[in-house]
Amino acid sequence: MKVLITDYPWPDTNIEAAICKAAGHELVAGPSAVSAAAEIEALVAEHQPQAIMCCWAPVSAKALQTPNDLRVVARLGVGLDNIAIDVATARGAWVTNVPDYSVEEVSDHVIALLLAHWRGIVHFNAEVKSGRWEPATAKLTRTRDMTVGIVGYGRIGSLTARKLATGFDTRVLVTSPSLMRDRRLGQEIAPGRFVATLDQIAEQADAIALHLPLTNESKHLVDDAFLRRCRRKPLLINVSRGALVHNAALIRALDGGRLSGAALDVVDGEPTPPAELVSRSDVIMTPHIAFSSAASLAELRTRCTDDVVRVLRGERPLHPCNSPATAR
């Protein structure tokens, strides 16, 4: 059968091709860079794949309706907001992801961004390289004295909270729909980690890290109303999805002094984020790489392709994200 990979932010597709070849399937690779929806639709129409693998490229309803015998759409990552899942489900195709391949990397990245801000790493690196050696200007933060809010308490959010609470002795406020449903408000669910509402996090946190999927409900969660509730000029950290944060509201909050800064691995509008956000000295930005390490990428590529092969053998995937009633 034919497997189409739409995009891939690594140098080659050798891992994916080798796994497909060993199973008797053909891998067809599109351009490594992310293409527009229309270009993906044309690729799918040309190759008529039984399986589609995608990283960030949009896999639209039209793309999914085109193949004669589509079996599976596999996300090379965690989030699914670039896939028309309902259309895949309606035509009996599985949708899969790899939910836990980069848990360590993303939680590490949050802490790296937080320390880069609180310890002045980015600022003073630029100062020294421009010829200024002025340690007396430092106004830095003791991490142990801070309160960090974690919005979203899944695999990554809970690990970030544990690393902060046990590694830095930081007070951590955590919230998620399941915590608010199953736990008591204010309950210490693990050493240094306390259940809180979103409002309490806005009011009490010195840094707020977003660990949420992008849904209709979570889009622009961080808007003017949320940012007006922030009382301690927190650092806002986003390593999940750019559209969780309303860019214009973020800029207004930074201009108005309601935030001490922002540290963003993802931003609405990537890969060409707003210049007025990128250029700010109070914003640290990395190009959607929180998931990345040699180990995590090898694991991601292998596990994703293995699940595709599993479906093409007629088996249930290990990481299904839908329930197609007529799946083959």
Image (tube, rainbow, N blue to C red):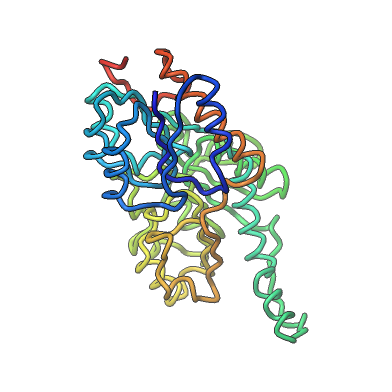
Question: For this view, does 93 lie left or right of residue 297?
Answer: left
Question: For this view, does 146 lie left or right of residue 24?
Answer: right
Question: For this view, does 130 lie left or right of residue 297?
Answer: right
Q: How many marks?
A: 0
Position above or below: 226 against 27: below
In percent of width and height, residue 296 lies at: 62, 39
Taking depth in this image into account, of 64 and 285 the one nearest to the observer is 64
Residue at horizontal 59 percent and vertical 52 percent from the top: 110
Residue at horizontal 45 percent and vertical 28 percent from the top: 26
In percent of width and height, residue 217 lies at: 30, 45
In percent of width and height, residue 21 lies at: 52, 25
Position above or below: 292 against 276: above
In which quadrant of the rendered image does the C terminus lie? top left
Residue at horizontal 44 percent and vertical 20 percent from the top: 317
Question: For this view, does 149 lie left or right of residue 225?
Answer: right
In percent of width and height, residue 295 lies at: 66, 39
